[in-house]
């Protein structure tokens, strides 16, 4: 496979296989799933009436990311 170069000598992104875009999107979904846990629990549950574990929205984000990832994999 030959790659064309753009005006600055860099590879043209249009020359990459389409699968790389899929891998990048899947990687972003997974990164978001991990990134939600960088926010401290005290900030997430600050306004909650109690500090119960089910009020921590970081844990709710994981199933949502998994559903989005599953739909993405299903329709690609």
Image: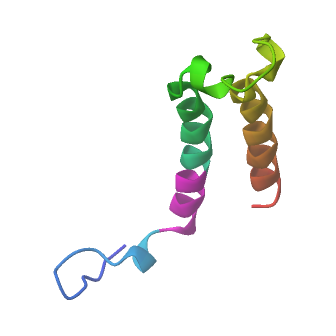
State the residue lying farthest toward the left.
8
Residue 35, image x and y in percent?
53, 34
- Residue at image x 28%, y 74%? 11
Task: Tell me if residue 33 comes above or below residue 3 in the rendering.
Answer: above
Task: Tell me if residue 10 comes above or below residue 51 in the rendering.
Answer: below
- Residue at image x 80%, y 33%? 63
Residue 26, image x and y in percent?
61, 48
- Residue at image x 17%, y 79%? 9
State the residue lying farthest toward the bottom.
7
Say left or right for 55 vs 27: right
Nearest the eye: 49 or 3:
49
Quadrant of residue 60 within the rendered picture: top right
Residue 41, image x and y in percent?
60, 19
Residue 58, image x and y in percent?
68, 28
Quadrant occupied by the N terminus: bottom left
User: Magenta part of the protein: which range?
Assistant: 17-25
Is residue 24 rendered magenta in the image? yes
Task: Tell me if residue 4 comes above or below residue 11 in the rendering.
Answer: below
Task: Tell me if residue 10 comes above or below residue 54 in the rendering.
Answer: below
Nearest the eye: 58 or 52:
52
Question: Magenta stretch: dominant SS?
Answer: helix
Nearest the eye: 53 or 18:
53
Coloration mode: rainbow
Quadrant occupied by the C terminus: bottom right
Say left or right for 15 vs 63: left
User: How many numbered markers are drawn?
Assistant: 0
């Amino acid at each position: 496979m030959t790659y064309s170069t753009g005006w600055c000598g860099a590879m043209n992104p249009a020359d990459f296989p389409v699968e790389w875009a899929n891998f990048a999107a899947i990687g972003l979904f997974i990164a978001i799933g991990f990134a939600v846990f960088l926010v401290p629990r005290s900030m997430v549950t600050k306004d909650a009436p109690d500090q119960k574990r089910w009020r921590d929205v970081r844990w709710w984000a994981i199933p949502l990311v998994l559903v989005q990832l599953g739909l993405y994999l299903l329709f690609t």
